[in-house]
Image (cartoon, grey):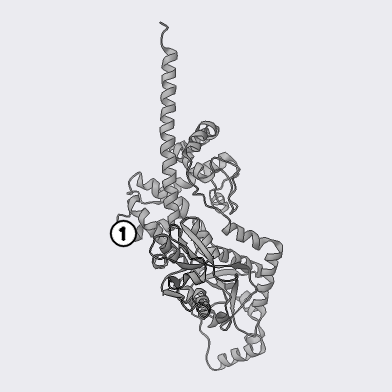
Amino acid sequence: MLSKSPITRTLGITIGALVLAAGLLTGCTPFGESKLQMVKKAGELLVLTRNSPTTYYQGPVGPAGIEYDLARAFAKHIGVALRIEVADRSRDIVPMIANNQADFAAAGLAVTPDRLKAVRFTPPYQQVYEQLVYRAGTTPPKDLADLQGQTVDVVAGSSYVERLEQLRQRYPGLKWETVHDAEAEDLLIEVQQKQALFTIADSNIVMLSRQFYPDLKVAFNLAPPDNLAWAFPISNDNSLYNAAVKFLDRMRRSGKLAALIRRYYSARNSFTPMNIEAYKQKIKTTLPIYKPLFQASGRKYNIDWRLLAAMAYQESFWDPNAVSPTGVRGIMMLTEPTADNLRISDPLSPAGSIDGGAEYIRDMINQLPSHIPEPDRTWMALAAYNVGINHLEDARILTQEQDGNPDSWQDVRKRLPLLALHAWYSKTKYGYARGYEPVEYVKRIRIYYNVLVKMDRELRANQRNGALHLRAPAM
């Protein structure tokens, strides 16, 4: 079960509390049950996290994020269901775990001396660097000495503040401003938009953000790498903690942990610079192979085949053997859950992938209100194809709340990027989304579509002229 509501767990008073206290002192829970046994008996593992691209978020086809996938695998390993609880702010997570408000936290937490006073951490599953980030076009500081006197914006209550306080003992001129109700991703966007000069973020967060904000640059690492780990309440009962430690070690030794990290952090930006000339050449050489398949699926689902072809080029460059770093394959890059839902027998075949993509975009169009005019309805459906129909609806609601037209793609596309900002996504039903991605996705497909329409018309005109020439009487 997914929930964003506050976590409440009531305990009995007097005798119940005394029994609980006695259990904690002896290393077990009431009635001789260990923490692990209680979790298994309840059939549910309650994990606290935060809404972000490096932890947990709602993807186009359901929950995603490296912390979510790792916690789900652990829950499956011990034979229980996973229940995710999302903290309103990252700085609330450690106090909530210290107060036993969840079984543990999987939230991309760095192990720091201050946090070790409140919770206990598993051995690390990933290492990251705290990096000073600036925008291209500005002069970066060469080192910490060069940074003195300049203000750095950092998230309030974060490990970055703790690091800066340590560094200020050596560099007394260090200055920073703590920003409340923001996450590291928000401040990176502010640097990109020239609203802040510098910020600090973990290298994994920077890596993901730079895929969509290429003007973000790293000046230097602040210190040796930090360890990311799961955080557990301090307790004499080690049963669940030990199970998690063994699970993480098993994931590491099997190579599954490294594969998961590659899945989320490998370079996977599909928004490389557009090469229209290469695209035009492929229209002549590669498209004719798949054109009948696009046309057949277009007729079946009442979709312009040229739009389907443009989508496929954006997804795979018309390569039926294309494989993304996340493991998605095929000419339309359908995920396994999507292919299963569409009951596609062979999603890796060009015919199956194209037909599945056509059915999926038709489903997105049909789910949108019928009063949305064309072509806005199609552009919104493409955005939903990329980011999910629920996040698109969140953006339409934000558009309406800001006195925009929720049925206008031009208005909605201005609000989609807000879904990546904590101040906005924290107010929406479905939370964080890389809202800038569907905007770029739709823009590129529209360009590919327009180029293809023009070339298709020219080809047909040439074919008609050629036919007329063949039928003309000899002079």
Please name whichever residue, 464 or 279, is drawn nearer the observer in this view of the structure: 279
**Total residue callouts:** 1
Instruction: Give percent across and percent down for residue 261.
Output: 61, 61
Instruction: Give percent across and percent down for residue 173.
Output: 46, 77
Q: Regarding mark 1 in the picture, which secondary structure is present there?
A: helix
Residue depicted at x 41% and y 43%: 446
**Residue placed under numbered mark 1 in the picture:** 400
Instruction: Give percent across and percent down for residue 100.
Output: 55, 81
- Residue 364 visible? The answer is no
Question: Hey, which residue is sitting farthest left in the picture?
Answer: 403
Residue depicted at x 69% and y 69%: 249
- Residue 194 visible? The answer is yes
Residue depicted at x 40% and y 33%: 454
Lateral position of residue 114 relative to residue 469, left or right = right
**Up/down of 49 relative to 23, above or below:** above
**Up/down of 350 relative to 459, above or below:** below
Question: Hey, which residue is sitting farthest top in the picture?
Answer: 475
Please name whichever residue, 338 or 126, is drawn nearer the observer in this view of the structure: 126
Please name whichever residue, 434 or 380, is drawn nearer the observer in this view of the structure: 434
**Up/down of 240 relative to 391, above or below:** below
Q: Could you classify mark 1 by the number of other residues whose Cα lies within 10 Å: few (under 14), some (14-19), or many (20 or more)?
A: some
Lateral position of residue 87 relative to residue 112, left or right = left
Image quarter (top left, top right, bottom left or bottom right) of the C terminus: top left
Amino acid found under the numbered disc labelled 1:
Gln
Residue depicted at x 48% and y 73%: 90
Q: Which picture quadrant has residue 135? A: bottom left
Instruction: Give percent across and percent down for residue 184.
Output: 47, 67
